[in-house]
Structures are given as C-alpha cells and as structure tokens.
Amino acid sequence: MRILIVDDDSTFLDLLEMSLAENGFKEVVQASSADVVLEFLDNEDPYFDCFVLDIQMPGTDGIKLCSEIRSRPAFRLAPIIMLTSSDSKHAMRQAFNAGATDFLHKPLNSLELAARINTASLLVESLKREAAPVLTVYENPTIDGELNGFHPGTRITFSKIRSMRDYFELENIFLRMDQSLYAVSLFTVELKGFEAVAESANHHDALHLVHMTASIIPRVLMSQRLLFSYVGYGKFTCALMARTPVVPQLLQSRLREKLDFHTKPRAKLNWESDALIVTSLSNRRIMAPSEAVRLLRQETKKLKSCTDRPVPAFEDEANRLFSSKS
C-alpha cells in the first residue's frame, strides 16, 4: 500500500513515516503542503492507495486539499484520513463534508492509525467490488419459468425478505461501523449438495429452495439485528448482533423443522432437510467489525464463485415468482 502523508511539520512527518513502517506500511511518501500534493497528482500517473492529511496547514488547508483529491476520478474512493490537534466539531464536520473517510486527533496512537488505515482500505475494496461490472442483475425469466444465466454459484438477494442483504452490502455495513468491539455471532447456513441437485434440476425449483430457506432464516431467529446474504452454492453467511450467542445445533434443528413443511420443491430436487447444516465461523463472541469482515471473506473465498468465474448478482425477480407461494 502506497500512502501519502501531508503535514507542514517535517519532524512530525518523519515520526509518522517511522510509525507507519513499524506497522507494516513501507511505501510512504511525504509532502509538506497542499501545493506539493497537487504537483504529485498532476503527474501523468500518480498512484496512492491512501492519504493522511493534517487539517491545519498554511495556505491551502487539509479540508480544501481533501476536496481537491476527491474531485479527481482516480481518488474518488481512496481512503482519506484527517489529522488535527483541535477538538473542533465544526472542523470535523467540514472534513467529512469534503470527503474524508476518517478523523484522528493528535497526538496519534500508531496502532490506532494503522487499524483505521486497514479498515478504510477494506471498505474501499468492498465498494470497488460492489461496483464491478460483473455484478449485474438478471431480471427476466424465460417463458418456461427457468431463469436466464442462473448458475449454482449465482449470488442472489431477495429484497422483500427482511434482514437479507447483498453480500457486499453486508460487508459495507460492518466496515462503516465504528471500530469498537461488538457482541456478534457469525455463522453459515448451508444446503449441502445444492450444486449437484441444482445442475440436474429445473432452475426454477432450485431457486425456489434458496428462496424458501432465505424466508425461513429471519422467521426462526426473529431478531432485528440479523443480517444475512446468499453467496452461492447453497450457502448463506449470517451475522447476528446480539449478546445471546447462536447455538448452531439448535438453530439447525429449528430450520430443518421449518423446511420439512415445504415438501414439494424438496421432492422435485431430491433434497432432504437434514442436508441443511449450520456452522459457527468463530468461537469469539466479541470482535471488531473489521474482524467480522475478515472471517466472512475467509468463508466466501472457499466458494468457487469467488475465484473460478465472475458470478452475477440476481436481485428480486423471484419476489414476483414466489410471492404467492412463500
């Protein structure tokens, strides 16, 4: 990661560069003023992954510089972390209005700065992935009820199901949270063998099974603090922000019991409810949002949909297909 640090105090810049290096950030470029930064950015191919700007500088201050950086297409998503020795809420508000990602007070805690840079970078990476052109939406079913482009690895979001989010939206919710510690249960709900049965069955029936399971998860957990996503290949990633932990075996039993009432699509797919598996992603009950994202990404990377092929996001055509059946 290449970081540009900006401050009119050369001693502070040297100390900041040393601190960043100690925390693993080796590519650091110093600038003593906004004018120097603008010279960098006016080069043919300026490349910076992150900016750390002091607010109070002579001439063009950090807030105006932040706005100028944001006006350039190459840096519209780049993390910009503002530094100040002032407690002015007005300055903080101005910085965020100018496009700042985060805000820290001097004197700095080097570990906190490193954590903020890492978290901001995760957020930007997630936003870029969310905006990628491969994440298109399929909306039109074919005449016989099958869906164009449906694949077992297709990521699906049913917008009318409470608590369900697109996976990247789920990441972004966590990454935009204050990086404190939270009580959170992370777990997956998996339809074992879904890929095989989906490839050999009618696409409509396979999608119906995903829709049924997605509908049942919030009904069983009955919590406003549940967020979950379908990430393809019969797997849901789930996060419950609550002090009471999720007991995988108990949740698994209750979900299977609910699915047993829906026999028709399961019979068509030759899939039984005892193939539904709930797995905890961590024994830790208290964690920072960035740690939750790391665990969720670790789980989704196991899927072929994350590595072997670009998988489109399917949104809520099934809301129309199944609204009268769920």
Image (cartoon, rainbow, N blue to C red):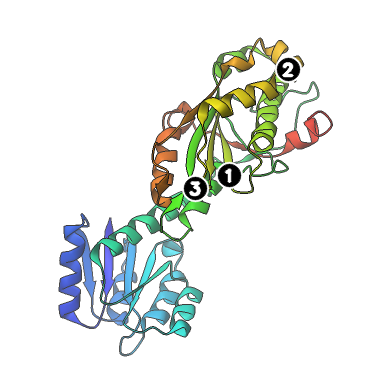
| Residue type beneath disc 1 | Leu
Residues marked 2 and 1 touching at CB (< 8 Å): no
Q: Does any portion of residue 244 appear in the rendered image? A: yes
Q: Residue at x 38, y 47 (%)?
A: 291
Looking at the figure, which quarter contains the C terminus?
A: top right
In the rendered image, the residue lying farthest to the front is 244
Q: Position of residue 88 (x, y in %)?
A: 42, 85
Q: Residue at x 44, y 39 (%)?
A: 296
Q: Position of residue 192 (x, y in %)?
A: 54, 18
Q: Count neighbours of disc 2 (C-alpha within 10 A) and say few if under 14, some if 14 to 19, many if 20 or more.
A: some
Front residue of 47 and 281: 281
Looking at the figure, which quarter contains the N terminus?
A: bottom left
Closer mark to the observer between disc 3 and disc 1 = 1
Residue under numbered circle 1: 227
| Residue type beneath disc 3 | Glu
Q: The residue tagged with tag 3: helix, strand or loop?
A: helix
Q: Position of residue 42 (x, y in %)?
A: 34, 71
